Image (spheres, rainbow, N blue to C red):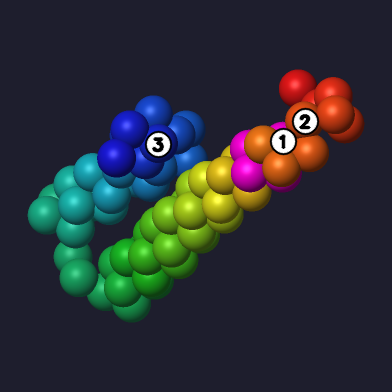
């Protein structure tokens, strides 16, 4: 959970969601509002995918270091 909370892209998505919610409450609901929410949803999916991929890569690298300690990666 910590990997999601402290990631800059996730924080950006959260603040973007707050901004989108404020704009939705204040303004009229036009096609621009729906486009803004679609953009936010795409950004959220990309941010979450990035965190998951980074975690998988870190775990794979740690596993490789465990399997081959003589390579000297650090």
Residues tagged 2 and 1 counted as in contact (Cβ below 8 A): yes
Q: Image check: 13 left or right of 25?
A: right
Q: From this viewpoint, is residue 35 visible?
A: yes
Disc 3 is placed on an element classified as helix
| Cα–Cα span, label 1 and label 3 | 21 Å
Residue depicted at x 67% and y 36%: 66
Instruction: Work out which quarter of the rendered image holds the N terminus and state it.
Output: top left
Residue 62 lies in the magenta stretch = yes
Q: Which of marks 3 and 2 is nearer the N terminus?
A: 3
Q: Position of residue 46 (x, y in %)?
A: 51, 59
Task: Report how far apart the C-alphas of labels 2 and 1 lie in the structure.
Answer: 5 Å
The residue segment tinted magenta is: 61-65
Q: Residue at x 76, y 22 (%)?
A: 74
Instruction: Quadrant for residue 58, please give it.
Output: top right
Q: In screen coordinates, is 61 left or right of 28?
A: right
| Relative height, residue 33 to residue 12 (above, below) | below
Q: Which of marks 1 and 3 is nearer the N terminus?
A: 3
Which element is circle 1 on? helix
- Residue tagged 3: 3
In the rendering, which numbered label is found on residue 65? 1
Give the residue number, with chain letter if any, for mark 2: 69
């Amino acid at each position: 959970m910590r990997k999601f909370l402290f990631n800059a892209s996730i924080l950006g998505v959260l603040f973007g969601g707050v901004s989108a919610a404020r704009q939705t409450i204040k303004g009229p609901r036009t096609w621009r509002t729906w486009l803004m929410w679609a953009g936010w949803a795409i950004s959220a999916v990309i941010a979450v995918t990035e965190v998951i991929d980074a975690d998988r890569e870190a775990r794979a690298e740690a596993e490789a270091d465990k399997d081959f300690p003589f390579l000297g990666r650090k």
